Image (spheres, coloured by chain):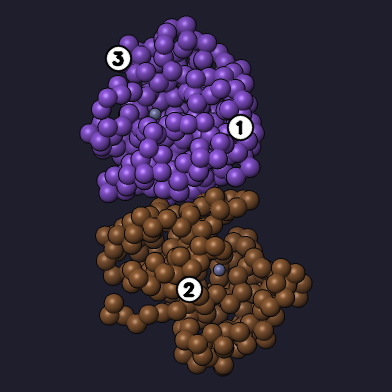
Chain colours: A purple, B brown
Amino acid sequence: MSNPCIICVAITGSVPSKADNPAVPITVAEQIESTHEAFEAGASIAHCHVRDDNGTPTSDPDRFAALKEGIEAHCPGMIVQLSTGGRSGTGRDRGGMLPLSPDMASLSVGSNNFPTRVYENSPDLVDWLASEMITHDVKPEIEAFDLSHIVQATRMAADGRLKGPLYVQFVMGVKNAMPADEPIFDFYIETLKRLAPDAQWCAAGIGQAQLTVNEWSISKGGHTRA
Amino acid sequence: MSNPCIICVAITGSVPSKADNPAVPITVAEQIESTHEAFEAGASIAHCHVRDDNGTPTSDPDRFAALKEGIEAHCPGMIVQLSTGGRSGTGRDRGGMLPLSPDMASLSVGSNNFPTRVYENSPDLVDWLASEMITHDVKPEIEAFDLSHIVQATRMAADGRLKGPLYVQFVMGVKNAMPADEPIFDFYIETLKRLAPDAQWCAAGIGQAQLTVNEWSISKGGHTRA
Ligand SMILES: [Zn+2]
Ligand SMILES: [Zn+2]
Ligand SMILES: [Zn+2]
Ligand SMILES: [Zn+2]
């Protein structure tokens, strides 16, 4: 690979709570501390979720602003990526932090099933989030939970709804969505390269799939989320 | 191919109305007439939607019963497949006709985007529809709008939620879902055969994709929807 390997660290996923694991960083101060450790260990992108005072996922722009400022102060040069995922809010609230102009934000461009519900990303909401990212000069990380999401991202780049080159994350291991499957992983790469030759990609394995997907990602030339 | 070619006819899709095209058969009598013509022309499966008196798509079991009886009377041996798709109802209403024990019913096993909305098939609803099909001895046609839907169907067959062998329809050409793309079509076949070697498949191209997808389907050994 000619491009340097990017290691992406997900500081606090949207699922765990202090009750599950007291070591999970939840407050902004804890998140900044743990991001700083990952930064010193070589991580270059911080993928960020935030919580309210009760530990519930939120899209509150003020929380995101505090986290972003803290990371920028303590981890100079680290890329801050804020989540617009559906676990922390609904509708346009999910994009309320985009006016902060973080370096990057996650963007889902299609819908799929999650373990117990539908992960809803309606066409209108997707287009609105994409346009907000263009307005505020935020680079999207496309979260691809299924093959059509990759195709949709390339169409959106072709018609100007997304600014290229694309950066796509393949997400595997979510129950009722795509499992970790190596031929499918390879086909994801092949399809992305065919439809958007200048695109870059990374991959995330959820739960038990994490190590397997990291290995595939490193050996096949992608970036990794730790 | 050793298995005979099955031609599947979609009598009335859920989208067109008389206002769009006065020739579209809407009443049950019109639907039976047009199914009969397709049957004489060689179609062996009738994929059925029904409308209420205003022409609005419905899941009304009485309407489905009348259509099923009419097809059985006029087209002996034709396979009747009733739609449990989400355009004609919501929640468990979508499966209200399954106690009629039609030969087949359509089944979506995942969620995806449609042109203007999310096509919602929550995990609970999918599992309930699948269990109703087992209870009433209805063979599902899996409607695969994306790659993970194929994988999910093979998982459901493996753990007993679906009775094999699987019969899967690849749907292409729906805006915001999967377009008609030949390498992806080939990979759909390859993945289905890898994960469920005894499965059969057919394909439907929506709108402008119809002829292209029919040609791929015939040349690659699938069944076709006309
Ligand atoms: Zn990443
Ligand atoms: Zn996230
Ligand atoms: Zn069919
Ligand atoms: Zn249908």
Toward the viewer: B43 or A57? Answer: B43
Toward the viewer: A108 or B24? Answer: B24
Toward the viewer: B197 or A155? Answer: A155
Q: Residues within 10 Å of mark 1 (few under 14, many from 20)?
A: some
Q: Secondary structure at mark 3?
A: loop
Q: Position of residue B76 (x, y in %)?
A: 50, 92
Alpha carbon distance from label 3 to label 2: 56 Å
A20 relative position to A133: left or right: left
Q: Which residue is mark 3?
A: A41
Quadrant (top left/top right/bottom left/bottom right) for the N terminus of chain B: bottom left
Q: Nearer the viewer, mark 3 or mark 1?
A: 1
Same chain letter for marks 3 and 2: no
The amino acid sitting under disc 1 is Ser
Subunit bearing disc 3: A
Please identify the residue farthest to the top as the structure is shown.
Answer: A73
Alpha carbon distance from label 3 to label 1: 34 Å
Alpha carbon distance from label 1 to label 2: 38 Å
Q: Nearer the viewer, mark 3 or mark 2?
A: 2
Can residue A189 be spotted in the picture?
Answer: yes
Q: Is mark 2 within 8 Å of ligand 3?
A: yes
Subunit bearing disc 1: A
- Residue lying at 68% horizontally and 78% vertically, measured from the top left: B23
The disc at residue B225 is 2
The amino acid sitting under disc 2 is Arg
Can residue B123 be spotted in the picture?
Answer: no
The amino acid sitting under disc 3 is Ala
- Do tag 3 and tag 1 residues touch (Cβ < 8 Å)? no
Q: Which residue is mark 1?
A: A131
- Residue lying at 32% horizontally and 47% vertically, measured from the top left: A187
Q: Secondary structure at mark 1?
A: helix
Subunit bearing disc 2: B
